[in-house]
Amino acid sequence: MLEVIIVDDDQIVVFIQKKMISNHEIAANPICFNNADAALNYLNEQQQLQNKKQFLIFLDINMPGMNGWDFLNCLESNEEKSNYHVVMVTSSINKEDKEEAKKYSMVRLFIEKPIHSSDCEKIKEIPEISHFFERV
């Protein structure tokens, strides 16, 4: 099972991402968090339940409090990190951010806001999760 999570403090961005994710059949009802702390707590709770879910996480970099990098650092040290597939979705056009994202094993894609249809198609082709989107 693939659970989709959006972590972004901008509610307009969250609204757009939810629509795109739903329209492109990535997830009908993604779970949304407006801060990284709450998302991390949720993932920790899910891990305690020991369900073997995979998580596709749409993650913003710049957020108040815990930012996207802090969130990734916490996930990177998690023993279940292979269950996390992160798509960085950011308004940053800083090339250094894109290079930094490559240092994290669970980052699968780096997208500049806003998310487009072509981005959704790329997400469905990510090798680690593409089997979730195969048509029967």
Image: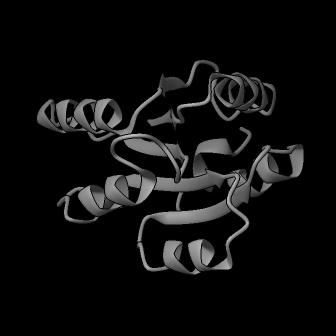
- 93 with respect to 75 (left or right): right
Position of residue 28 measured from the top left corner of the image (x, y, whole percent): 64, 20
Residue 27, picture quadrant: top right
Looking at the rendering, which quadrant does residue 104 occupy?
bottom left
What residue is rendered at 68% in x and 60% in y?
92
Q: Left of 48 or right of it: where is 90?
A: right
Q: Residue at x 79, y 52 (%)?
A: 119
In the image, is 14 to the left or to the right of 122?
Answer: left
Q: Could you say which is closer to the camera, residue 79 or residue 66?
A: 66
Pick the residue in front: 35 or 44: 35
Q: Is residue 126 visible?
A: no
Tell me the residue at 42%/40% (across/down): 64
Residue farthest along the left direction in this orientation: 48
Q: Quadrant of the C terminus?
A: top right
The percent position of residue 63, horizontal first and vertical second, equals: 48, 43
Residue 107 image offset from top left, x and y in percent: 50, 65
